[in-house]
Image (cartoon, coloured by chain):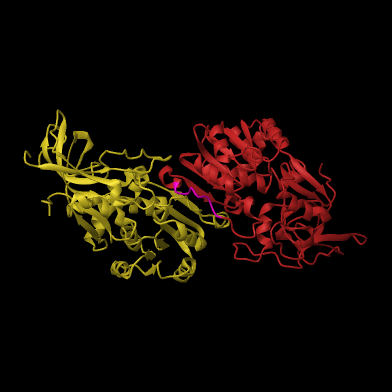
Chain colours: A red, B yellow
Amino acid sequence: MDNQKNHEIRLKSRPHGLPTTDNFEFVETAVPTPGPGQVLVRNSYISVDPYMRGRMVDRASYVPPFQIGEALTGGAIGQVVASNSDAVKVGDYVQSNYGWREWFVANGGEVQKFEPVAGLSAHLGALGMPGLTAYAGLLRVGALKDGERVFVSAAAGAVGQIVCQIAKAKGCYVVGSVGSDEKAAFLKSLGVDQTINYKTAGNLAAALAKAFPQGIDVDFENVGGAHLEAAITNMRPGGRIALCGMIDMYNATELPPGPNNLALCIGLGLTIKGFVVPTYYDMLGDFQRDMAKWVKEGKMKWRETVVDGVDKAPAAFIGLFKGENIGKMVVRVGPDKAV
Amino acid sequence: MDNQKNHEIRLKSRPHGLPTTDNFEFVETAVPTPGPGQVLVRNSYISVDPYMRGRMVDRASYVPPFQIGEALTGGAIGQVVASNSDAVKVGDYVQSNYGWREWFVANGGEVQKFEPVAGLSAHLGALGMPGLTAYAGLLRVGALKDGERVFVSAAAGAVGQIVCQIAKAKGCYVVGSVGSDEKAAFLKSLGVDQTINYKTAGNLAAALAKAFPQGIDVDFENVGGAHLEAAITNMRPGGRIALCGMIDMYNATELPPGPNNLALCIGLGLTIKGFVVPTYYDMLGDFQRDMAKWVKEGKMKWRETVVDGVDKAPAAFIGLFKGENIGKMVVRVGPDKAV
């Protein structure tokens, strides 16, 4: 460790609109030394997620904003290199919120030991928070019933790809929106019934009406904007909208207007329910059990978009808003000995 | 009956924007004669409700539109004058959907007999559908818990006045929005904690922030527009919005944009649930039981705005959108022998 250096990404300035790499700072520091009760972890993969955009601005928010000049945080998977904690030992694989960096020191209680059941990076994606987000959002927030009609926006993303497959495993008719033919082909390979390329589909409400002649029971909403409005127009009576993300407006410099058809919620008895995954951590056990079963049955696959080097994390993050990822976007920042 | 004439209101043309009396036609007809299995009813009161505006336009809707040249329909309370049906007998008080007219003939199964427990008109308001709307919307759609913080828009209206008092009966802190000082005073007399006059309050989100320093648990939304947006801004984590009406846009000639802050639903875990009362008819028994109890305990009062003469029904209906009513707006079209 003496010869090792840590590299991390700090927030340099608050982005206005779509972030640029100038908003981030790549910094070299010494690898820290763990104190009493602490552990030293070398990260293998770190996560970049759309929700992080919300913490980069300093406006009223439900989460504390990232601070200028400090290393960003976020999901990370790594291995314990030194431990002064009874909770974990050297060699343990751990997940933490110490992302955007290669090495870190933390109290033993701040890292969660886990047994890798697939490539390490999957534990930041399909088997991690995005997977649980899909599971909880579809089954509890969306109250999905077997055989229903499901629309998934940003369906080839980290969460969307899992939503699609859970819905298929539940015998549902599933339509996903995507931004490229490659993503459409990927979804088809997962068994998704139809895809809509929102960049070429023209009127999205009309495209959804065609794909859902009988309407939508559950909209798993990752995009917002025109996607959400088009979905509301096509919902069936009693339909549910699980509002997971609104990536369409995360970089807006002025708040764009909301859907103009919310009044349909009244007559149709629609439910729009927003959520974040920590509210549903009680489902973690069920999620892990069901995912293991679906993987074994060949009903659950996933893709990842892996970028190499912590210095590339800002570009990877920005790429999320340009649709550059298929499946989960992760950044490899260290060795992956588990593979 | 031989000397009697019926008078009714027909839809003459579809309104564009706020309806005018020219959109309606006042017509005199013979009192009809009941056939086999039919009953003849003389209405005492008929209901005018904001939701009816949605049936006057001929656009995609979850309810069939009213037809030009036909008598409008809606809630009505009357008394059986002749009966060829085993279901009801002469003198029975009945409610039906044969509003906007003085007399009607219908099959026995189309009228529901009831025992008046207050003035007949109350069965179109506090003790009828508006009351059940308040009850179901607050307790089941809004999932109200005792002691929570409740915002009610259009709080002095037919539904709002009941919502406020149910919430108070449940030990809640209740703030209502109104459009006049007279309505504010009325709500105060019902025990409502604070009122906001939206016409003079300036920034509605700021007014709500002041009235709810700890945020809103349940928003019973009758108005939409700026009211809904301001409520969303001030919701507490896990808050629920029972979307009952959006009167703010019922007369819009172009669909106005929706709230620009729906993304708050994600982080705060908010639920927006639209509803119409027929979905909750299973609660009728509980509603009647609880209302009787609250009335007896002095916890439930109501006001009505009574307009005389079926010819005045169009003006009464239009008045709903100008805030002319306090409590339920009803039109007296016949004798009220029950009082």
Q: Is residue A191 above or below residue A131?
A: above
Q: Quadrant of the C terminus of chain B?
A: bottom left
What residue lies at 79% left-to-right and 45% top-to-bottom? Answer: A306
In which quarter of the view is residue B108 placed? top left
Count of residue discs: 0
Q: Is residue A21 above or below residue A207?
A: below
What residue lies at 30% left-to-right and 70% top-to-bottom? Answer: B185
Q: Measured from the top left, where is residue A264 in percent x and y?
A: 45, 45
Q: Assess whether residue A258 is covered by the magenta stretch.
A: yes
Q: Measured from the top left, where is residue B275 in percent x and y?
A: 40, 47
In which quarter of the view is residue B13 placed? top left
Instruction: Tell me if I can see residue B94 in this picture.
Output: no
Q: Assess whether residue B284 is covered by the magenta stretch.
A: no
Q: Measured from the top left, where is residue B306 in percent x and y?
A: 21, 57
Q: Is residue A215 left or right of residue A195?
A: left
Q: Is residue A62 left or right of residue A9?
A: left
Q: Is residue B129 left or right of residue A228?
A: left
Q: Residue furthest top?
A: B36
Instruction: Tell me if I can see residue A147 in this picture.
Output: yes
Q: Residue furthest right?
A: A3
Q: Is residue B30 above or below residue B176?
A: above
Majority SS type along the magenta span: loop
Q: Measured from the top left, where is residue B256 in percent x and y?
A: 48, 53
What residue lies at 65% left-to-right and 59% top-to-bottom? Answer: A54
What residue lies at 19% left-to-right and 35% top-to-bottom? Answer: B106
- Which region is colored magenta? A257-263
